[in-house]
Amino acid sequence: MHRIRETLATIVILAIAQLLCHVGLLHAQARNTAQPYRTDPKWQAVWQEVASEAAQSTVQIRVEGKTVALGTVVSADGYILTKASEVKGPATVVLADGRELDARVIGRDEAFDLLLLRVPARGLKPVNWSASHSAPVGSWVIVPRPDGRVASVGVVSVAARRVPARGPGSYPNPNVGYLGVTLASSEDGPEVTSVLDDSPAAKAGLKPGDIIYSLAGRRVRNPEELLEVLRDYPPGETVRLVILRDQEFLEKRVTLGKRPVDFSRAEFQNRLGSELSEKRSGFPIILQHDAVIRPQDCGGPLVNLDGQVIGINIARAGRSESYAIPAEVIQRLLPELVQGKGVSR
Amino acid sequence: MHKRHGWGNRLMVWRRRLWGLWLLGWLLTLGPAWTEPLPSKPDADGQNPAAKTSVAQEIAELRQVQQRVQAVVRKVTPAVVAVLINPGQGSGVVVTADGYVLTAGHVSGKPGRDVVIVFPEGKRVKGKTLGVNPQMDSGLIKLEGNGPWPHVEMGDVTQLRPGDWVVAIGHPGGYRPGRSPVVRVGRVLRIVQQLVQTDCTLVGGDSGGPLFDLEGRVVGIHSRIGGDISQNIHVPVNTYRETWEALTEGTIIGLAYLGVRGDESAEQAKILEVDPESPAAKAGLQPNDVILSCDGKKITDYRSLRSLLWQKRPGDTVRLEVLRGGERIELKVRLGSRQ
């Protein structure tokens, strides 16, 4: 009896000590540090409340019993959109109410990486679309899960934009011609402001101050036009370059090189702290946001602070970027997908 | 994001300093849930009425933050630039009408380099790198040509508190024609030695880009990242203001050498070690000396001594007021060079 009382007393004292300690430290913590907002419990109920309706239109896509993506219910009679490249076999769909149904592939859009599935169900709750401009840059976005919790939250980073497969705005491509200069706009045309040592431009004798007049016979008026022309020539190709130096035209021949990007480092950094989607580039139109999602969180809705769906998540593309296909694009694509686009019968 | 000296080294130093805090932070997040108020009785539809009102209030709060972030983005984006330095790329922000651009020290590198600055609508302007502070990772660039350039106001890191919302803008992955500067939102997680850590997710190419408070004032410059998604470090804007003259004159800051080490966390500038043969040793400085002022300017701690020395050049003579064993003495030191 005595022992038990002693032990109890010790436990109580320890508990009180721990309590005081925690309270003190919590105060200290409140003063000196804050939690990352995406995982702060304070906001979870709020994000969940905002996205609760969209969560009811969110489903899980399974292949061989494993969840590979989320899906977005687009009609009451069983049409569901998801990320095509994540679905590598016959799929089942787990609805918000827990039913797991076999899915039939109805349509596919390769460029946008979208797959339209159909499950034998009625009375489903389709998403409430809103054009993506209803959430301008800086607007909150929420990625709901079917269980009502949120996968992540963030803001719109770049408004919906068209990204040509090749051309301005696309990713630096290591397989296009490279000169090794920096360029500034000037009245006469693109002006060389620096020449990298040992670069193709250096070997051809280009100097800072040169104005590039034409490349491979094509007149270029600004840096963008020059980059445009370079995209048509692969590394190793020799092209004619006409430059303007001290008011005189000079002709040079330059053998284009390969862009010396330290891909290992860029790639390493891009992957720090998050796993990326296998297919994460080449979409013709994207909305960029900074919610930290996993590849298997793609295919589901992206929700604004009014609970409306402004797009479907299509890729985790980097440490700071996630992509969604804007709602207005999806609404335009849907009729063709329902008609069986991209699927042979 | 460090390109030349690699963010690894600096990150290690930062991490070592922060390790204790980190661990504490993580331990505490696993702390007791019972400090939360107990839920009251659910109402008829199974919801908690008190929780409902608080959710409504918090949605209103988020809506307010959203409006302010959108306003900041509209106001500041014209002044956020890409910095092209062959063969590297980074970001920056214009802070004066005549074209001074704040960037990271590891983006601008040595003074006097040619750079091209790209404005959001695609206009490319030539510039030159000016001063740099490798220890703080701050750097300055001047645009050529006549302004006035779109620019933003410089804020004050000491006004920031953990939990404050902030907006990070830059060019992650490098400049892409047709893509507007990329916006990310987060909160100040902690501030140590004026370095700001946020959960605004950054990546290579963002280096040198601005961090804004919700008034649209630049408070930090993106510097480096760690392994976790919430380890994003920004140089405090205050260091640019404190070393403005040296930066605009194109100085490599931190070359002036005194030869002492002190306790960074102490509340006074107490000397712990004096390098043998150093300018400090030659002038007679000793361990346990407390430095009270330098050239008449009050020194409050070791950090303030260091940032004052950043404004000096090798060869400059400084007058130190020193407290030694209760007595005030004055010493003159001719600064050496670290190179």
Image: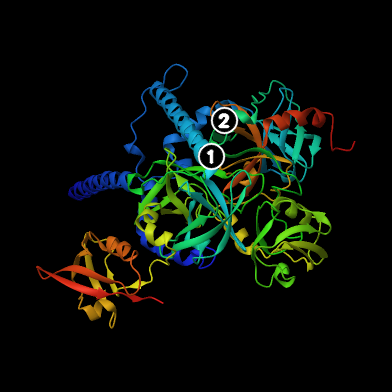
Q: Please identify the quadrant where the C terminus of chain B is shown.
A: bottom left
In the image, is residue B39 above or below residue B154? above
Q: CA distance from mark 1 to mark 2?
A: 10 Å
Amino acid type indicated by mark 1: Gly
In the image, is residue A199 above or below residue B25? below
Residue depicted at x 46% and y 52%: B221
Residue depicted at x 70% and y 35%: A93
Question: What residue is pinned by disc 1?
Answer: A154
The answer to whether A79 appears left or right of B42 in the picture is right
Residue B125: image location, x then y, percent = 59, 52
Q: Chain of mark 2?
A: A
Residue depicted at x 53% and y 46%: B80
Amino acid type indicated by mark 2: Asn
Q: Quadrant of residue B268?
A: bottom left
Q: Secondary structure at mark 2?
A: loop
Q: Secondary structure at mark 1?
A: strand
Identify which residue, B79 or B36, lies in the foreground: B79
The answer to whether B26 appears left or right of A340 in the picture is left
Where residue A304 is drawn, which disc sits there?
Answer: 2
Residue B257: image location, x then y, percent = 33, 73
Identify which residue, B179 or B333, lies in the foreground: B333
Residue depicted at x 73% and y 25%: A121
Identify which residue, A41 or A259, lies in the foreground: A259
